[in-house]
């Protein structure tokens, strides 16, 4: 299993879950964004508890998302 997660808030939580899973030997977490070209992209990370609204677009529903830059790659380069 490969989990790709761009959120700098959610990725560490996903890594913790994978580390204690009985499937940890075959679960790989990749803390990157996926896009059409490698590089960096603005990512809107909401305050704690609002991760459901995180993303590359600020939807305005998070109650104050902070824009951070995250690394981005393509699926072809990742795979």
Image: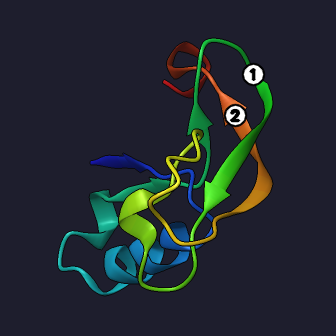
Mark number for residue 38?
A: 1
Q: CA distance from mark 1 to mark 2?
A: 5 Å
User: Which residue occupies the foreground of this view, 7 or 45?
Assistant: 45
Q: Secondary structure at mark 1?
A: loop
In the rendered image, residue 42, in percent from the top left (x then y), is placed at: 75, 42
User: Which residue occupies the foreground of this view, 76 or 54?
Assistant: 54
Residue drawn at x 17%, y 79% is 22
Q: How is the image coloured?
A: rainbow
Q: Is residue 31 placed above or below 12 in the rendered structure?
A: above
Q: Is residue 73 placed above or below 47 in the rendered structure?
A: above
Q: Secondary structure at mark 2?
A: strand
Question: Within 10 angstroms of label 1, few (less than 14), some, or many (20 or more) residues?
Answer: some
Q: Earlier in the sequence, mark 1 or mark 2?
A: 1
In the rendered image, residue 38, in percent from the top left (x then y), is placed at: 75, 22
User: Which residue occupies the foreground of this view, 70 or 14?
Assistant: 70
Residue drawn at x 44%, y 60% is 61
Question: Within 10 angstroms of label 2, few (less than 14), some, or many (20 or more) residues?
Answer: some
Mark number for residue 5?
A: none
> Which residue bears the numbered disc 2?
72
Q: Are marks 1 and 2 in contact (CB under 8 Å)?
A: yes
In the rendered image, residue 12, in percent from the top left (x then y), is placed at: 54, 76
Q: Is residue 11 placed above or below 67 in the rendered structure?
A: below
Residue drawn at x 36%, y 63% is 52
> How many marks are shown on the rendered structure?
2
Q: Quadrant of residue 19?
A: bottom left
Residue drawn at x 29%, y 57% is 26
């Amino acid at each position: 299993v490969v989990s790709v997660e761009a959120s700098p808030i959610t990725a560490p939580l996903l890594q913790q879950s994978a580390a204690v899973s009985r499937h940890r030997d075959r679960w790989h977490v990749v803390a990157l964004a996926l896009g059409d070209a490698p590089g960096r992209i603005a990512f809107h990370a909401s305050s704690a508890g609002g991760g459901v609204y995180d993303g590359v677009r600020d939807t305005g529903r998070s109650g104050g998302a902070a824009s951070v830059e995250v690394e981005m790659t393509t699926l072809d380069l990742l795979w």
